[in-house]
Image (cartoon, rainbow, N blue to C red):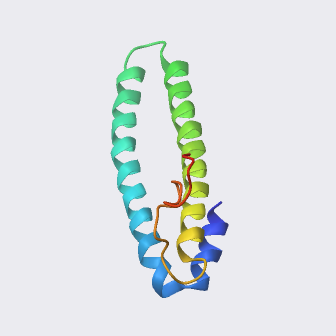
């Protein structure tokens, strides 16, 4: 997923990169906030004797679910970028909704 986005950015770096950089910075800020919260929860958990394995499981679950969500999000983001920049003109409608001339909805 990540290489799809980066390789697509190379095709129109001056147009696509600023948008991708903004997305990256937003994600980094989100993960910094979440990391601080999960660290507090971990420290609280391990402060009680016998909770070490639960704390490790909590961190593992957080890491796996966060990475899975990021991978899914990044694939969807690539789809969005591809549709938006495929021919050099922004679309007239959202790539995640039906075009105005279609009678069905997604």
Q: Is residue 17 above or below residue 38?
A: below
Residue 66: x and y in percent read 52, 42
Q: Position of residue 76 (x, y in %)?
A: 58, 55
Task: Please name whichever residue, 74 or 83, is drawn nearer the observer in this view of the structure.
Answer: 83
Q: Nearest the camera: 51 or 96?
A: 96
Query: Residue at 55% across / 51% down in the picture?
Result: 103
Give the residue at x 66% y 68%.
Answer: 3
Viewed as shown, does residue 41 lie left or right of 74?
left
Position of residue 85 relative to residue 28, above or below, is below
Residue drawn where x is 49% and y is 78% of the image: 16
- 93 in relation to 72, above or below: below
- Residue 49: give x, y in percent of width and height: 43, 13
Foreground: 56 or 88?
88
- The quarter of the picture where the N terminus appears is bottom right
The residue lying at 42 percent from left, 22 percent from top is 46
Total tally of numbered discs in the picture: 0
Q: Looking at this view, is 89 or 64 the one in front?
A: 89
| Left or right placement of residue 30 versus residue 53 in this view | left
Residue 100 spot, x, y in % from top left: 48, 60
Compared with 88, 33 (above or below) is above
């Amino acid at each position: 997923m990540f290489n799809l986005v980066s390789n697509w950015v190379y095709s129109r770096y001056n147009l696509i990169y600023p948008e991708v950089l903004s997305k990256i910075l937003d994600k980094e800020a989100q993960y910094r906030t979440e990391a601080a919260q999960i660290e507090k929860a971990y420290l609280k958990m391990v402060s009680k004797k016998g909770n070490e394995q639960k704390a490790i499981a909590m961190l593992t679950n957080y890491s796996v679910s966060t990475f899975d969500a990021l991978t899914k999000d990044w694939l969807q983001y690539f789809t969005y970028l591809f549709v938006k920049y495929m021919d050099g003109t922004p679309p007239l409608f959202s790539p995640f909704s039906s075009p105005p001339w279609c009678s069905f909805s997604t």
